[in-house]
Image (spheres, rainbow, N blue to C red):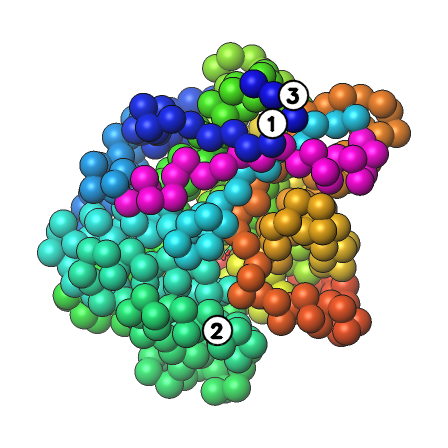
Amino acid sequence: MSDEQTMFTLGPDEQITHWYNIVADLPTPPPPPLHPGTHEHVGPEDLAPLFPMELIEQEVSTERYIEIPEPVREVYAQYRPSPLYRARRWEKALETPARIYYKYEGVSPAGSHKVNTSVPQVYYNVKAGIRRLTTETGAGQWGTALAYACSLFGAECEVWQVGVSFDGKPQRRTLIEVFGGKVHRSPSRMTESGRAFPEDHPGSLGIAISEAVEVAAQDPEAKYALGSVLNHVLLHQTVIGEETLRQLAKAGEGAPDVVIGCAGGGSNFAGLAFPFLRENLTKGTKTRITAVEPSSCPTLTRGEYRYDFGDTAGMTPLMKMYTLGHDFVPSPIHAGGLRYHGMAPLVSHVKHEGLIDAIALPQLECFEAAIEFARTQGAVPAPESSHAIAQARREALAAKETGEEKVIVFGLSGHGLLELGAYEQFFAGKLSDDSLSEEALAASLANVPKIG
Ligand SMILES: Cc1ncc(COP(=O)(O)O)c(C=O)c1O
């Protein structure tokens, strides 16, 4: 193998056959979700109006490994294993002794990691006889991924797209339509949850989730699909970390010093990080694991760890998570997929237990890092992924100071070729670093329900 090898892949006989469930290895079990009305533990029957039974079983499973069904593996084989790259040219530009690797999910049909879960979600729904799926989308990546999966398995797909994204990213909308999905601007006039807001409201993921849930709950032929946050979504994303572990071994590396992922609802972060966390928990490796979020939506770093709703209207189960308050409307930063008030309960739990750490970064630093990365590595990052790049850059520059040859791995969760408008605004000096004021945070936390 050449010393200068930059791309690491896996052979056909090395495909990942099982998803990894971190719940099996956690020192303490994560707190259960609660019914929004009674505050009792949620049982599988409470989730049945929204999800098919096989996904509910995965949601509550404590099995360590869950086999990936053959039809899902066939679709994964279109774009997986995704490449792991060594960022040699960026390392040189940064003059760092660190070795930087990135796992690139932008090779999927929708351009991000979201296809890893849209495919199994649609597969299990169609298997259960469901023909219509509703969902929300922030940046548009999840809507694209779900529309693509629905087109493969013959289901209808209806997407509520957060208002600012709908207005600012018409090409994402078109891509969803190319894959056969139908798109509504959220807040829409079609639902009670949407009509509670003015039509020109910028929207939020919380509002769009309420709209999609409301429609699915009223139609016995329909179910709802969520692109992040829930246990089964994080489970499906673990193909990312499982592949990365094997690819790093091919690159001749042991346990990396640090693994970094951007975190909105927490799915790509968990997908990359949880297999490494398993190694820490079961084999005593000491990899540091860092979730990166935007300073304008700092859920893990400034939110409170308590029960809250996953949506704005309060229709979802109450989940124990870091939250900024379910009616928090983040400033319209360009990383639309990171504008969520909560964080996956499993990611929140491992953060609360001190098993991972988190940092919030300002958006201008993220764009600067993404552009430097694009100019050396040739991949244009999604604005969400740029948060992981900026933190990898901080780690690489710290290694330069100390002379440490550390190994840094980060998740490049998607490409930004449909987000060029955001780069255009950055070059025109129209973007700023909005941080969240204490007053705004206190106001939205005041509306979080008081449980127990
Ligand atoms: C490219 C990309 N990365 C990251 C995210 C954040 O979501 P999650 O935290 O669930 O990975 C999104 C969400 O839309 C996304 O499109």
Asked if the stretch drawn in magenta spans residue 358, the answer is no
Q: Residues within 10 Å of mark 3 (few under 14, many from 20)?
A: few
Of residues 322 and 389, the one nearer the viewer is 389
Assess whether mark 1 and mark 3 are in contact (beta carbons under 8 angstroms): yes
Marks 3, 2: nearer the viewer: 3
Number of marks drawn: 3
Q: Which mark identifies residue 5? A: 1
Q: Could you tell me which secondary element the residue under label 1 belongs to?
A: loop
Q: Is residue 370 above or below residue 174?
A: above
Work out how far the residue at label 3 is from the one at label 2, CA to CA, in angstroms. Answer: 41 Å
Q: Residue at x 75, y 27 (%)?
A: 98
Three-letter code for the amino acid on which mark 3 is drawn: Asp
Asked if the stretch drawn in magenta spans residue 78, the answer is yes
Q: Which residues are magenta?
A: 75-96
Give the side of residue 270 with respect to residue 216, left or right.
right
Q: Residue at x 57, y 41 (%)?
A: 411
Q: Which mark identifies residue 171? A: 2
Residue 442 visible, this orientation? no
Three-letter code for the amino acid on which mark 2 is drawn: Gln
Q: Label 3 belongs to which residue? A: 3
Is the shortest distance between ligand 1 and the CB of mark 3 under 8 Å? no
Q: Residues within 10 Å of mark 2 (few under 14, many from 20)?
A: few
Marks 2, 1: nearer the viewer: 1
Three-letter code for the amino acid on which mark 1 is drawn: Gln
Q: Residues within 10 Å of mark 1 (few under 14, many from 20)?
A: few
Give the x, y percent position of residue 123. Answer: 22, 49
Which quadrant of the figure contains the N terminus? top right
Work out how far the residue at label 2 is from the one at label 1, CA to CA, in angstroms. Answer: 36 Å
